[in-house]
Amino acid sequence: MISFKNVTVAGSGVLGYQIAFQTAFHGFEVTVYDINDEALSKAKAKFKILSEAFINDLHVTQEQLDAAFQRLRYSSDLATAVKDADLVIEAVPENPEIKIDFYQKLATLAPQKTIFATNSSTMLPSQFATYTGRPSQFVALHFANEIWKHNTGEVMKHADTSDDTFQAVLEFAKQIGMVALPIYKEQPGYIVNSLLVPLLSAGMDLWIRDIADIETIDKTWMVATGAPLGPFGILDVVGITTAYNINKMAADKTQDPVKLKIVETLKSEFIDKGRLGVATGKGFYTYPNPSYRNEDFLK
């Protein structure tokens, strides 16, 4: 049975830094890779904030957190970051050209033993398998946001993934506190996003066509289903940049005028103005006290 000790997480964005900290917390040696030292400095700051969430939500001890921090390393040099890696989890931006470039570089630098896992939310592992140089050692491993609470670990094969790789990554998901969810065939969006993306798309469609305002759309969903967040509250957590990238791919493919308007609005009114969601304190709502948390929001 393949086992892992040294894990490299490539990309320290919305999910990358969470994956890295979760993995270190559960006893693995973790190297965080990002493109420059500025990005790594931001990751370190986010780890400090994340440790508070672990205390509040999981009731962990300071000793456990200190041990996790001791297991974290940082590098902006890819060769250094992966030289001892048993597993590389790729969490770089949701852009196929960026991912292809990353895997082409990674293939020449990682030891032959290293298994690669993509955390892509929207793209299939088969899109990148040949660029890895080791298709049988390549699989998808997808997490929900706030992974320490919403602890799904979706592990998805592509046609050439070996059974040993698949089973090893499923076991790894369990070892870092996830509910391991095997997906035997490629499915765009895995299970979670196959259910979630249509909801978010429907919400943005209603908003951009002026059917209803953001708060009304969210209120409707929350009241009708008992969900803690509506689609726009979820989008703020996911991050506006991710929403933009997903919609841009759909707009480029279909040239649908509604999708094109969504993309244009997300770019000009949100991304260009630094309104990227919870991470920046402002997206569709303002944080840390969004209006959907007000006592009378659902009335």
Image (cartoon, rainbow, N blue to C red):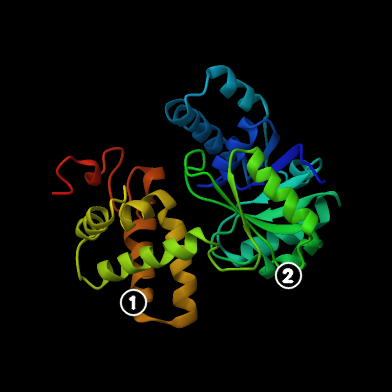
Q: Nearer the viewer, residue 38 or 231?
A: 231
User: What separation in Å lies between label 1 and label 2 (alpha carbons)?
Assistant: 35 Å
Percent coordinates x, y for residue 74 in the rendering: 67, 36
Instruction: Return the residue at label 1.
Output: 258
The crowding category of the residue bearing disc 2, from other C-alpha atoms within 10 Å (few below 14, some 14 to 19, many at least 20), is some
Identify residue type, mark 1: Val
Horizontal side of 276 relative to 45 (left or right) equals left
The residue under the point 76% across, 36% down is 5
Q: Which residue is mark 2?
A: 159
**Residue sitting at x 39%, y 57%:** 271
SS at badge 1: helix
Picture coordinates of residue 191, whole percent (x, y): 52, 61
Relative height, residue 10 to residue 104 (above, below): above
Quarter of the image where one finds residue 103: bottom right
Task: Mark yes or no: residue 206 visible.
Answer: yes
Q: Is residue 274 visible?
A: no
Percent across and percent down for residue 139 are: 70, 58
Looking at the rendered structure, the kind of residue marked 2 is: Ala
Q: Nearer the viewer, residue 199 or 81?
A: 199
In this picture, residue 206 sits left or right of residue 154: left
Residue lying farthest to the right in this orientation: 112
Observer-side mark, 1 or 2, equals: 2
Q: Secondary structure at mark 2?
A: loop
Quarter of the image holding residue 208?
bottom left
Seen at 64% across and 32% down, the residue is 26
Vertical relation: 251 (above or below) 230: below
